């Protein structure tokens, strides 16, 4: 995998890069909010939905490894525009699916396109940080979370007003396409040097695994919160859309807070945040009303928000930053993408309440593991 970032001419522009983060979050927030409509249209069980969402992973991971580095090398900062152009088309497809095979194919396409966008925008952020000496990772991931908030709440309100999943995803597609046009004006020549492979140093892999476990909580909660509120707590679509929206908003708050939380150690921030996430998931799992469930999702989002900036930041500070980032990114995204199908599988065997209870236990395990990690 290629990941060490250098630039021949110029620095990627900050605003278009952040727009890419926002657009990526916008789709996944809207997707979480329209998931109840998708389930109704396809007639799938929770387990079958989980299987379908597994194909997001199967589509995105190969693109992250084999396609994105070459796209970055060829197109530079404009690889974000290339990814967004494909993503704008892919986001239309889940709204058209009426059966499992069509949904599987559409989510695989979304995973492929989002994988290209994800690696490209993080490549731009890495180049900006290296060139300016200023941290941008928490702000960038916070902007993604704002996109989740806007997408989820907007989709929930649209569903409440009678809109189906198709027009909602068409609106998201238009925004992503506009982002592609914006980023296409960025001509910075960013490319990726070839990595020597994944770095299996004991401490690095340990931190990467802990980060991946925390990502399971993030991915599972973001994707299933709206359906939990609507099916389990009988919330109105306008309220169920607040599940992933509030989760994304609290993650944005936590990440912006993390930008200024330099007086706390990484161990304290990661462990304390995971403890808060465990409490939040536990509250959601036992909630009997939608407002209580929303409080749980807000706490979970704030708690798990600093995982990505801490884990990726640790890798980026190492002398072998290239291979270190490759290692933790690979592990981390596996956790993020495994979360949704894992929750679906547990829910099919038991219930969504049990699924969120399991996420609480996973977050608690991160607390224990974080106390034993070395961040130096």
Image (tube, rainbow, N blue to C red):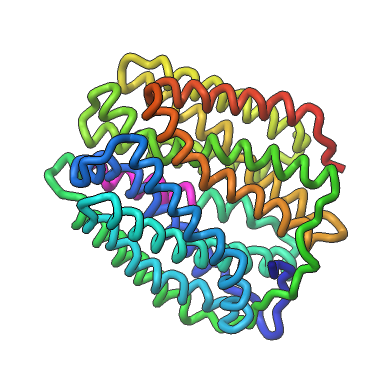
Residue 176 spot, x, y in % from top left: 37, 66
Tell me if residue 145 is in the magenta stretch. yes
Numbered range of the magenta stretch: 144-157
Q: Nearer the viewer, residue 29 or 115?
A: 115
Up/down of 308 relative to 355, above or below: below
Left or right, 104 with reference to 190: left
Q: Is the magenta stretch mostly helix, strand or loop?
A: helix
Q: Nearer the viewer, residue 130 or 132?
A: 130
Up/down of 100 relative to 242, above or below: below
Residue at 43% across, 53% down: 55
The answer, for residue 19, to whether it is visible in the render is no
The answer, for residue 4, to whether it is visible in the render is yes
Q: Which residue lies furthest to the left in this view?
A: 162
Residue 209 spot, x, y in % from top left: 70, 41
Tell me if residue 171 is in the magenta stretch. no
**Location of residue 285 (image quadrant):** top left
Residue at 43% across, 75% down: 182
Q: Nearer the viewer, residue 297 or 39?
A: 39
**Location of residue 221 (image quadrant):** top left
Residue 213 spot, x, y in % from top left: 62, 37
Residue at 76% across, 69% down: 195
On-image quarter of the N terminus? bottom right
On-image quarter of the C terminus? top right
Residue 336 spot, x, y in % from top left: 54, 45
């Amino acid at each position: 995998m290629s990941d060490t970032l250098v630039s021949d001419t110029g620095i990627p522009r900050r605003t278009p890069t952040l727009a890419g983060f926002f657009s990526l979050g916008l789709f996944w927030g809207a997707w979480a909010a329209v998931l109840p409509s998708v389930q109704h249209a396809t007639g799938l069980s929770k387990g079958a939905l989980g299987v379908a969402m597994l194909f997001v992973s199967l589509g995105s991971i190969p693109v992250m490894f084999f396609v994105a580095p070459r796209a970055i090398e060829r197109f530079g900062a404009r690889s974000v525009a290339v990814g967004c152009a494909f993503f704008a088309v892919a986001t239309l497809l889940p709204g058209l699916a009426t059966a499992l095979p069509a949904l599987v194919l559409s989510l695989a396409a979304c995973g492929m396109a989002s994988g290209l966008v994800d690696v490209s925008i993080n490549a731009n952020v890495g180049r900006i940080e290296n060139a300016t000496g200023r941290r941008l990772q928490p702000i960038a991931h916070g902007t993604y979370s704002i996109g989740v908030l806007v997408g989820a709440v907007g989709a929930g309100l649209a569903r409440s007003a009678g809109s189906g999943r198709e027009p909602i995803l068409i609106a998201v597609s238009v925004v992503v396409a506009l982002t592609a046009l914006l980023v296409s004006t960025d001509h910075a020549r960013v490319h990726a040097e070839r990595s020597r492979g994944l770095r299996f140093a004991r401490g690095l892999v340990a931190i990467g695994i802990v980060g991946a476990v925390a990502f399971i909580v993030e991915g599972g909660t973001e994707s299933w919160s709206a359906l939990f509120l609507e099916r389990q707590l009988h919330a109105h679509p306008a309220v169920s859309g607040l599940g992933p929206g509030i989760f994304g908003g609290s993650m944005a708050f936590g990440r912006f807070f993390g930008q200024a939380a330099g007086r706390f150690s990484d161990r304290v921030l990661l462990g304390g945040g995971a403890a808060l996430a465990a409490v939040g998931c536990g509250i959601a799992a036992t909630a009997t009303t939608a407002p209580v469930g929303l409080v749980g999702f807000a706490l979970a989002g704030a708690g798990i928000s600093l995982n990505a900036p801490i884990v990726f930041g640790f890798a980026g500070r190492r002398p072998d930053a290239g291979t270190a980032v490759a290692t933790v990114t690979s592990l981390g995204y596996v956790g993020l993408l495994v979360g949704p199908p894992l929750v679906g599988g547990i829910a099919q065997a038991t219930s969504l309440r049990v699924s969120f209870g399991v996420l609480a236990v996973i977050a608690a395990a991160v607390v224990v593991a974080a106390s034993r990690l070395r961040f130096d």
